[in-house]
Amino acid sequence: MKHKHIDSQMLMRNLPSPSPRFAADIAAQLRTLVKQEEEPQMKRKVLSTILIAALITVLLAASAWAAYTLSRSKQADAVSQARKALSTDYDLTSETFGLFWFVEKQEGETWTITFYAQGFYPQLLGDYTVILTPGNAPRTSWTYDHIDPAVWQDGSLDAPVWGQPQMITALRNREAADAIIAKMDVNQDEVRSLHGSSPLISTLKEGESIWYGEIIRDAVPGPDDISQDEAVDLARKAIMEESQLTREALEAAAVLADFYECDNGNPMWGFSFRLVDHGIEQDWGLMVDARTGEILLLNVITGGNG
């Protein structure tokens, strides 16, 4: 009799996340089934072998889920909370977040995350700020909170300021957006440079980059580092939590991968997921701790930039 081959990777992908007692409960149930089996000795051996194989598969699946548990650094978690707050208060989506770059500041247990406009014509978009304080609801604000929402809520690109309706329209109709912006007095020197030029740049050697003021270097993963496939899977899960993108869309994306060694921390995987979804170009960038799998940074750039 031929037995159907079960793809363990597909099995693990579709299993629900196990509870702490999951593996132990399954093991107990399988032992009980083996003990109660009344078939002849040979059949019992065959059944036992099948059940043991099933138990091993289940335990491996549980272990894999434990290894793939998604976690974020405090910084990444704060930014994620800020995005959710702005999505609730201003209806921003992952596509329109790609028109901004964020800068975060921590003072004690309070985080202030500011999303600075970089896409299209920044003066139209304004900036968004979120203040996170333990025990309190996020405090959100927008440059144009003082303007009557009726001015822009109809979605017209001719509005004096652009909220979510204008931004999503502009992303899906770049030609119309460019026509509006062409009428404006755009001075590229006024476009904000968030990080400026670092004094470290002039000292960089080949294969070196700057990440949050630290020099990181191209490297090769070692035996203590999680594999690229594992890190990519964690990155996909993080993006799915921050957007409406499906696993299928992310698996079809072009993925660029880099590996870095750091002077002041664990090595890191760096990824860029590039795709087009509903006509909007998206480039998701992530940094993943190569030892712990923790998401260190997640950001998105959409078609309104450049």
Image: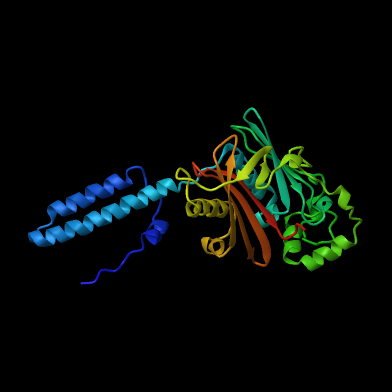
Q: Nearer the viewer, residue 16 or 8?
A: 8
Please name the residue shown 67% across and 45% down the image: 209
For the N terminus, which image quadrant?
bottom left
Please name the residue shown 35% across and 42% down the image: 20
On the image, the x and y values in percent for residue 279 come to 67, 67
Q: Report the side of 261 relative to 63 (left or right).
A: right
Q: Is residue 206 visible?
A: yes
In the figure, 245 relative to 292: above or below?
below
Q: Report the side of 3 relative to 126 (left or right).
A: left
In the figure, 181 relative to 192: above or below?
below
Q: Nearer the viewer, residue 5 or 174?
A: 5
Q: Report the side of 40 relative to 196 (left or right).
A: left
Q: In the rendered image, which quarter is residue 10 located in?
A: bottom left
On the image, the x and y values in percent for residue 256 come to 60, 57
Outermost residue on the left side: it is 40
Outermost residue on the top side: it is 108
Q: In the rendered image, which quarter is residue 275 located in?
A: bottom right
Q: Report the side of 254 relative to 145 (left or right).
A: left
Please name the residue shown 77% across and 46% down the image: 127
On the image, the x and y values in percent for residue 31 come to 19, 50
Q: In the rendered image, which quarter is residue 213 located in?
A: top right
